[in-house]
Structure formats: C-alpha cells, structure tokens
Image (spheres, grey):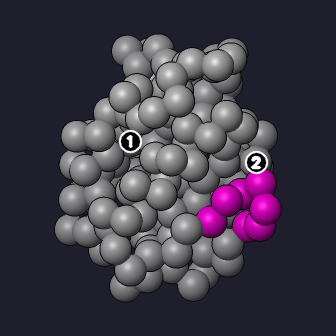
Amino acid sequence: MRTVVAYVTKGGGSKECAEMLAAEIGDCVLCDLNEKTPNIDEYDTVVIGSGIRMGGAYKPFKKFLSENADALLKKNIAIFVCNVETEKYMKFVEKAVPENIRKAAFRISTFGGKPPFGGKKDTVWMLRDEVSEFAKAVREKA
C-alpha cells in the first residue's frame, strides 16, 4: 500500500516533523504542499500536516482538505499539527479540519511546536515519542 506524507510549513517545524515521520514510516512519498499537490488517487494512506500560527492552520492545508474531501474519505487518513500550545491542538484541528474528515482519521496528533521568531534551532521542541507512535500507527494501518 502506498503512503504519502503531505505537509505545509512556514517556519520549518512541520517539515522537520514530516521528514522524521516519513523516515520512520519508510517507503512513503514526502510532499510539501507549498510546492505541489499529490494525486491522492495514487495512495492508500494519506498523512497530512500543518503548522499552526496565530491559532490557525496554513491555507494550503485547508485547501488540500477542501479540494480532496470526498477522495480522502475513501483513504486511511492521519493528521498532525505542529503548534507551541500543545494542550490546545484539538481546538486548532477542529477549526481547520472538517468534521467528517476528523471523524474518518485514524490518528490525529500534535508534534509540538517550534518557537517562532528565532526560537530553538534544534529539535528539542519536537515531541519525538509522539512522532514515533504516529509512524507506528501509520505502518500498522498501511
């Protein structure tokens, strides 16, 4: 079964998480939604992620969900966000992801958030254990 990890980032945190996630899933396609949109008909499992800034997910993330809603509901879906306020991540997900897609997702998680404006340059902020558990769930589903 084919898996795509599609993400959108501005500060780089979602990209770092998506790269780690893809490496742990293995044998999957990594796709930056700022550069291109994957043809999800080619995949059985679709992982989609976005950074959260000022309480909202990025536009390409929301556009991807909107334009592919019907097709996504026929796939294995997993969603991740990268946000500093990790305790509020579901609030952000509820705002950005349509209810039918949220309900269809087999996993929704936060991977932590890279502090904006010159915050930490390493990955200390990343919830690495959550990324690993998420990857394990994707491998089991795929």
Q: Nearer the viewer, residue 110 or 18?
A: 18
User: What percent of the width, then of the height, locates residue 90?
Assistant: 44, 25
Q: Which mark is residue 108?
A: 1
Q: Amino acid at mark 2?
A: Pro
Which mark is first along the chain, 1 or 2? 2
Task: Examine the structure image and report whether residue 34 is included in the region drawn in magenta.
Answer: yes
Q: Is residue 103 magenta?
A: no
Pointer 1 local density, CA inside 10 Å: few below 14, some 14–19, many at least 20? some
Q: Residue furthest front?
A: 121
Q: Residue at x 29, y 40 (%)?
A: 128
- Residue 106 in the image: state x and y as whole percent: 33, 53
Give the quarter of the image for residue 38.
bottom right
Could you tell me the amino acid type at mark 1? Ile
Give the residue drawn at x 67%, y 77%: 39
Q: Read off the residue under disc 2.
A: 60
Q: Position of residue 115 (x, y in %)?
A: 55, 19
